[in-house]
Image (cartoon, grey):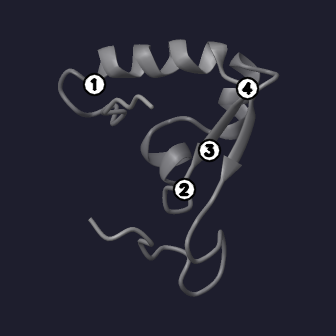
Amino acid sequence: KESMLLNLDPKAEGAQSDRTVFEALLSRADVLVENFRPGVLEEGLGYSWEALHARYPSLIVASVSGFGQTGPFAQRKAVDT
């Protein structure tokens, strides 16, 4: 098992090289599973489903959240850091 840490925040210094790595991984991936709060992948990081689908048409995007995508608790963090 291998892992890596990538900073995908487009406002962060030096994050562009990490975003390049992430996008290279996406070009070879079948599935992207993310567990951010609703809206973070799209609004915070700039990877909307529409943008991902346009660039990687066969990519399946699965969004998992601890409290659902909608509802009164949707914006709560589900992972304690």
Pointer 1 residue: 15
Please state the horizontal and vertical placement of residue 52, each as a whole percent of the image. 67, 28
Tag in front: 4 or 1 = 4
Please state the horizontal and vertical placement of residue 24, each as a whole percent of the image. 52, 12
User: In this image, 13 relative to 71: left or right?
Assistant: left
When the figure is inspected, residue 27 is found, relative to residue 7, above or below; the finding is: above
Tag in front: 2 or 3 = 3
The CA distance from mark 4 to mark 1 is 24 Å
Pointer 4 residue: 30
Q: Which mark is residue 33?
A: 3
Q: Are marks 2 and 3 in contact (CB under 8 Å)?
A: no
Q: Are marks 1 and 3 in contact (CB under 8 Å)?
A: no
Q: Amino acid at mark 2?
A: Gly
Q: Amino acid at mark 3?
A: Val
Q: Residue at x 64, y 83 (%)?
A: 71
Pointer 2 residue: 39
Please state the horizontal and vertical placement of residue 75, each as a whole percent of the image. 48, 73
User: In this image, 69 relative to 54: left or right?
Assistant: left
Please state the horizontal and vertical placement of residue 9, each as a whole percent of the image. 33, 36
User: In this image, 58 relative to 67: left or right?
Assistant: right
| Mark sitting earlier along the chain (2/1) | 1
Q: Are marks 4 and 1 in contact (CB under 8 Å)?
A: no
Q: Amino acid at mark 1?
A: Ala
Q: Amino acid at mark 4?
A: Asp
Q: Which mark is residue 34?
A: none
Quadrant the N terminus occupies:
top left
Judged from the image, the secondary structure of the residue bearing numbered disc 4 is loop
The CA distance from mark 2 to mark 3 is 14 Å
- Crowding around mark 3 (Cα neighbors within 10 Å: few <14, some 14 to 19, many 20+) is few
When the figure is inspected, residue 70 is found, relative to residue 28, above or below; the finding is: below
The CA distance from mark 2 to mark 4 is 22 Å
- Crowding around mark 4 (Cα neighbors within 10 Å: few <14, some 14 to 19, many 20+) is few
